[in-house]
Amino acid sequence: MLRLALFHGFNRIRLKWRRSVQESCDSASLSSGISPGPAEMRYYSSGVPKSKKQRKELIAEGPTLEEFIDGEVKSDTTWKEYTGKLKREAKDRERLRLPPWLKREIPIGKNFSKLKEDLRGLNLSTVCEEARCPNIGECWGGNDDNVATATIMLMGDTCTRGCRFCSVKTARRPPPLDPNEPVNTATAIAKWGLDYVVMTSVDRDDINHFVSPRFLDFIFDMRWQNPSILVECLVPDFRGDEKCVENIAKSGLDVFAHNIETVEELTWLVRDPRAKYRQSLAVLEHAKTTVPTLVTKSSIMLGLGEKDEQVMQTLKDLRSSGVDCVTLGQYMQPTKRHIKVTEYVTPDKYQHWEEVGNDLGFAYTASGPLVRSSYRAGEFFLKNLLEKRKEE
């Protein structure tokens, strides 16, 4: 009873406060001698329309998203002028503000809308959406010189692992697999007319023996519909199952990718306990041993509290495991429940790591704040690299 009385008392106070604010707004606009226009009438009215239809019309007449978001996103060249804080201290509780070089424009455009509509129609998921990739507008939207691309995610949108950096949904028992997924995926990609496609998947530890066959089904269907397409598979670790790794490596794909994600010292903090640093290296090395001509690829996130010497050691470990291509990009906290960003790494440091990667002998090093493992700048390089190898 006491709780109910407090609730009703709070509501009465809130209503009185609202009326006083509305009356003060009305009197202020009238005393200024300015007759309020339609927009002002909407916001200073003494109450919300009672009719549901009128409320919908009120919302529909409001400003559009494009009008609301006014102003240009700052270019990467302004980063040296930024005076904000880039690194969290141990005592800090608040999240760091996003620096200008990490801000992107709102994704819009015909290609973006068409690709999204096709994905929904075929009940497909993309890592672009599930992982909240900042490059989604650029990759999906395309431009005059590039084809719109997307990284398709097999086996649904729910993972059995709970890495602290990843925004993909998790569950112990995800929904059953869609039997039409490989065919639908191949159909969608053929429809877009792509010449390079990236496939990835969630982890499904509950049905680990079905994971590699699902990749094989997709590659077969894709090759059947478009024999000339180049296929990159960004695969899970299969819990270290070498047979699964061999099946994927021998499937006829062009690029075998598996992400190390972070340095060894932070793996326990960042990744799911079932994901091991040495296990990921073993997966990459075994794929290369199985098919020596296969292009292998991995990715590292920066900004989680790693030290320079740890990043250097990770790059050396990847290179000694036979990895051909590596990408380095900024970790960005997807939601408040995920691990916080420790540091926003500056563009010049990414330039440094690109030079280090090239010196270590990687065929390609993509390093930048917004670079991701499936970022298309790398895809076009890999396309040229693969075609050159085929000619040889």
Image (spheres, rainbow, N blue to C red):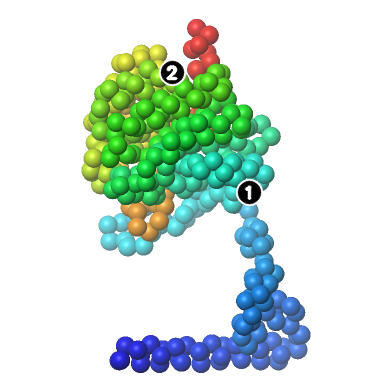
Q: Quadrant of residue 192?
A: top right
Q: Which residue corresponds to mark 2?
A: 252
- SS at circle 2: loop
| Whether label 2 touches label 1, CB < 8 Å | no
Instruction: Give the x, y percent position of residue 372.
Output: 45, 38
Cα–Cα span, label 2 and label 1: 35 Å
- SS at circle 1: loop
How packed mark 1 is, by other alpha carbons closer than 10 Å (few <14, some 14-19, many 20 or more), is some
Task: Classify 75 as above or below 257.
Answer: below
Q: Quadrant of the N terminus?
A: bottom left
Task: Classify 24 as above or below 171.
Answer: below
State which tag comes first along the sequence, 2 or 1: 1
Instruction: Give the x, y percent position of residue 99.
Output: 48, 52
Task: Classify 76 as above or below 9.
Answer: above
How packed mark 2 is, by other alpha carbons closer than 10 Å (few <14, some 14-19, many 20 or more), is some
* The one of 313 and 54 positioned closer to us in this rendering: 54
Q: Amino acid at mark 2?
A: Gly
* The one of 6 and 21 positioned closer to us in this rendering: 6
Looking at this view, name the residue that lies furthest to the top: 392
Residue that appears at 49% across and 25% down: 221
Q: Quadrant of residue 314?
A: top left
Instruction: Give the x, y percent position of residue 101.
Output: 51, 47
Instruction: Give the x, y percent position of residue 305.
Output: 31, 46
- Tell which tag, 2 or 1, sits nearer the viewer: 2
Q: Amino acid at mark 1?
A: Ile
Residue that appears at 37% across and 46% down: 175
Q: Which residue corresponds to mark 1?
A: 108
Give the label on residue 54, or none.
none
Residue that appears at 35% across and 92% down: 5
Q: Is residue 11 among what the camera can see?
A: yes
Q: Is residue 355 among what the camera can see?
A: no
Left or right: 218 with respect to 209?
Answer: right
